[in-house]
Image (cartoon, helix red, strand yellow):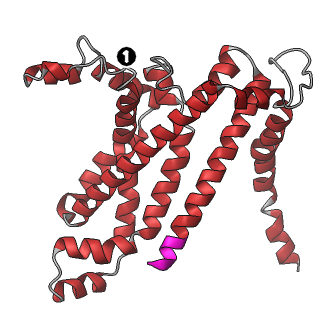
């Protein structure tokens, strides 16, 4: 009994950290979302006024739509590329470790560094992308990539995909490593081609890795802030203004702490809801494989 109580004592530091840095901020944000607090002075209770403002203005629905669009593009392309590279590297053990490290390196870089590097690449005057197009004689494809509402969001998604494809690849490679070699050998003995082994043996067994990658990428992209803020500031014409960017603009740009808190609560509910149903669907798919 004494040993059992001692085990519970070891959980106290973790519980304290969770309460102080997780539960209390959530409670404080919920409480603040019903006020007009501006960072200083008295916080007056305004009821559901902040939430009524959110759901009565197209601006915030547009920002949510941008967040969903960004998330859908990144999650789809990033995981497809990560799966492709993982499948190739799994079959090329001689270069696997070096290539895995090279692919994973961008995800360890600062968002600020990545944002400014890609901002230079997309520069309409001396940027690398337009320079390459000019060299190839494709001047008609040159664009002010970050200043054109039709291309700005795609430009930022490309930077994000470049940054985290290696992260997805590493998770998929871990999934490949867990596949029994006996299964692979049985496929070879049955005369299955490399594509057939991937399609009918490896891909179904990668279901847990697919679930992890999709869920993590969805959470990360729905709350994305750094790259849109650094590369475009939400422009042009709101084409890259995500819900997280709206929160930060209201919080630090206009000092509307109460309204920013209500936006953060809405975003949290959206993310939790999306991830809950997505995880439920993917877990059910794993069980049916």
Q: Is residue 149 above or below residue 29?
A: above
Expressed as whole percent of the image width and height from the top left, the position of residue 96 reads 24, 59
Residue 177 visible here: no
Q: Is residue 144 above or below residue 49?
A: above
Residue 192 visible here: yes
Q: Which of the pair 173/234 is nearer the observer?
A: 234
Q: Secondary structure at mark 1?
A: loop
Residue at image position (38%, 74%) is 204
Instruction: Identify the main secondary structure in magenta.
Output: helix
Expressed as whole percent of the image width and height from the top left, the position of residue 247 reads 65, 27
Residue at image position (92%, 21%) is 44
Q: Which residue is mark 1?
A: 147
| Residue 122 picture quarter | top left
Q: Quarter holding the N terminus?
A: bottom right
**Magenta segment includes 271:** no
Q: Is residue 180 above or below residue 86?
A: below
- Left or right? Give the position of 146 relative to 282: left
Magenta region, residue range = 284-289
């Amino acid at each position: 009994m004494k040993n059992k109580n001692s085990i519970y004592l070891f959980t106290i530091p973790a519980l304290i950290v969770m309460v102080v840095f997780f539960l209390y901020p959530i409670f404080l944000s919920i409480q603040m979302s019903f006020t007009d607090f501006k960072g200083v002075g008295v916080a007056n209770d305004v009821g559901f006024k902040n939430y009524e403002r959110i759901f009565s203005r197209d601006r915030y629905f547009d920002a949510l739509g941008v967040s969903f669009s960004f998330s859908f593009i990144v999650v789809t392309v990033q995981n497809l590329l990560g799966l492709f590279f993982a499948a190739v590297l799994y079959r090329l053990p001689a270069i696997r470790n070096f290539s895995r490290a090279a692919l994973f390196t961008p995800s360890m870089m600062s968002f600020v560094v990545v944002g400014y590097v890609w901002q230079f690449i997309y520069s309409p005057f001396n940027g690398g992308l337009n320079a390459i197009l000019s060299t190839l004689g494709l001047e008609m494809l040159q664009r002010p990539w970050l200043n054109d509402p039709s291309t700005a969001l795609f430009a930022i998604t490309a930077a994000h995909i470049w940054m985290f494809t290696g992260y997805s690849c590493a998770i998929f490679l871990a999934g490949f490593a867990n596949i029994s070699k006996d299964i692979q050998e049985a496929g070879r003995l049955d005369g299955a081609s490399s594509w057939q082994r991937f399609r009918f043996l490896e891909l179904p067994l990668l279901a847990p890795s697919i679930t992890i990658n999709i869920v993590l990428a969805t959470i990360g992209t729905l709350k994305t802030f750094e790259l849109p803020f650094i590369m475009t500031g939400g422009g042009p014409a709101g084409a890259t203004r995500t819900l997280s960017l709206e929160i930060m603009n209201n919080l630090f740009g206009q000092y509307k702490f109460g309204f920013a808190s209500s936006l953060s609560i809405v975003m949290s509910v959206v993310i939790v809801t999306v991830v809950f149903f997505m995880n439920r669907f993917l877990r059910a798919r794993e069980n049916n494989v």
